[in-house]
Structure formats: C-alpha cells, structure tokens
Image: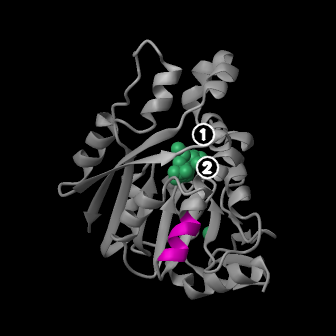
Amino acid sequence: MNKIELATQFIQRHLHQFQCPICKSNFNEVQSGTLICNNQHSFNIAKKGSLFFLNNPVNTEYTNEMLTYRNQFLTAGFFNPMLEEVINNISGDLILDAGCGEGTTTKWMASHFDGDFVGLDISKPAINIAGSGIAPQPYPLFMVGDLAQLPFADQGLTSIVNILSPANYQEFDRTLATHGELIKVIPGNHYLSELRQLVYPDGEHATYDNAPVKNHFIEHYEHVEFSKISYKFPLNDKLFTALFNMTPLTWQAQDRKEAILQDGLKEITAEFEIGVVHK
Ligand SMILES: C[S@@+](CC[C@H](N)C(=O)[O-])C[C@H]1O[C@@H](n2cnc3c(N)ncnc32)[C@H](O)[C@@H]1O
Ligand SMILES: [Zn+2]
C-alpha cells in the first residue's frame, strides 16, 4: 500500500474526529486522496502521505539543515527514556503530537503504543522530513497545520502530547475528549547543560530557566502532576556534530564552531519535566 492509501485509511478510521480548519464544519468524505468538508473545502494528501492545512508557508527558526541534524540526533535515541514516560500517560485511539517537528517522536510513540498518532507542525520542511523514507508501521499521519487552528473536532482527540513546543491551551481544551490527557514536556533547567557551558563559557546564560513556560502551564491548569526525568546520553563525534547543528542555542558560537567541534563532548545531559493534566 502506498502512503496516500495508508493516509486515506487512517483518515477514514477517524473521519468524525477531524474538522475543517477554514469553516469548522465536519469532513464528510475522503476520496482518491482528497479530504472534503461539508462546505467543499478540499485538502489533498501529498505523495508522502502528508496533509497541508496551511496554504502559506511559515518560516520558523529551524532550517532544513538543522531539522536534518535533529532527525539524526533523535533517531539515535536521545529522547527515548523521556518518550517512555510520555506513553505511560496517554490513552485512547487518536493521539496528537502537537508541534512534532521532524516526526521522530511521533514515529517512536506510534511503534510503542497501540493507538493512531497524528504529528502536526507549522513547518513544511519538518513535515517533509517526517514523511520521507519507507512508510513506518504502524503508520502515523503527518500534517502541516497551526496549533492555533487545529483541524480536529471538539473532543476529537483522546490524548495530546506537546514536546518542547509552543502550546495553544484554548485549542487543546476544545479538541481534547473528556477523560483525555494532555502531556506537556518542557526542558529541565539542566537540559543540554554541557553544550550551554561551551557556548557561554563565562557562565552567563549557562543554565536554562524553565519557570516562565512552567508557570504559564500551571496558571492555565489547576491540577498538573509533574515528574522529572534526567539522564546522560553518550556522544561520539558524529552525534556531537548533529547536536551542535540542530539547535538555535549554538548560533551565538558560530565563530568558535570548529574549535568546539574539535574538542568534542563525551556525553550530554537530557533533563525534562513532564506535566500531565487529566481532563
Ligand atoms: C523545539 S521544536 C520541537 C519539535 C519536536 N517536538 C521535538 O521535540 O523535536 C518546536 C516546534 O514547534 C513548531 N511550532 C512552532 N509554532 C507552531 C504553531 N503555531 N503550530 C504548529 N507548530 C508550531 C516548530 O515548527 C518546531 O518544529
Ligand atoms: Zn470547510
């Protein structure tokens, strides 16, 4: 089965859980690779199986090159212990990875949890990488869309996962089913600390402060259960090069890039706080 057919089958299984992001009406059919709403707005499934709900490209700070390095780093397993904790908290049959980037997290979760996964990101280059290569089994659906206008019906999603990405709590509240859960992952204060110390050797900005993001989340939800996960991820030269090039954090140090890459790093700290909200 090709990717258009796999995506079509996926949408057919969940047709009533989607919603047209233009007019908010239901979709009544998906036919020959086209999704059509009650008011005749139509969205084609691209060859790579992805859906494009945004017509105008939006430039993000992540270039195609950075996304390719991020893909290399994440497929090496950097997030896996954190993702294991995330899937312990999800439920149901349609789970959104909101701000999925190049899609490694979505694919990993789809292969470790029995449910259908949608990866949504505003970046077209990110979704292009997500849809590349052989079709993963089980098959996640990738789409270019905006968190501020989710193409899902009210209560259409059984869980929402939001990893190191911006959130839109109004849209999350609208689309999440009663008894569903929202899992938000934010960087811990020591996330990538060894890299920060190389970029900011004088100590300034060498630690990250996650308080503003965490407080905004807590302000919106009365009952959030937080857990922290921390581990060291071993690096080799190739992985360190990928790490250096995948994040905007190192833009400050472009003039010292060669020296930093030459010195290398043996390991890097992964630290996350995982907030879970039950609706
Ligand atoms: C730091 S990246 C994290 C990506 C991925 N979750 C990961 O951990 O690798 C943040 C992502 O949020 C996406 N993003 C930013 N604003 C968005 C919006 N309004 N709607 C959808 N995605 C958005 C960006 O394109 C980017 O891929
Ligand atoms: Zn419509």
> Where is the C terminus found, in terms of image quarters?
bottom left
Q: Which mark is residue 253?
A: none
- Give the colouring mode of the picture: one colour
Under tag 2, what secondary structure? helix
The residue at 23%/45% (across/down) is 219
Ligand 1 has an atom within 8 Å of the beta carbon of the residue at disc 1? no
- Spatial CA span between label 2 and label 1: 6 Å
Residue 70 shows in this picture = yes
Question: Mark 2 or mark 1, which has the lower sequence index?
Answer: 2
Count residues near mark 2 (Cα–Cα under 10 Å), then give few for <14, some for 14-19, many for 20+: many
Q: Picture coordinates of residue 45 (x, y %)?
A: 75, 72
Is 176 in front, or is 240? 240
Ligand 1 has an atom within 8 Å of the beta carbon of the residue at disc 2? no
Secondary structure mostly seen in the magenta stretch = helix
Q: Which residue is mark 2?
A: 73
Under tag 1, what secondary structure? helix
The residue at 72%/50% (across/down) is 125
The quadrant where ligand 2 appears is bottom right
Q: Picture coordinates of residue 178 (x, y %)?
A: 29, 75
The residue at 42%/32% (across/down) is 193
- The kind of residue on which mark 1 rests is Leu
Q: Which residue is mark 1?
A: 243
- State the extent of the magenta-drawn residues as a range: 106-112
Is 9 rendered above or below residue 74? below
Is 160 rendered above or below residue 91? above
> Where is the N terminus found, in terms of image quarters?
bottom right
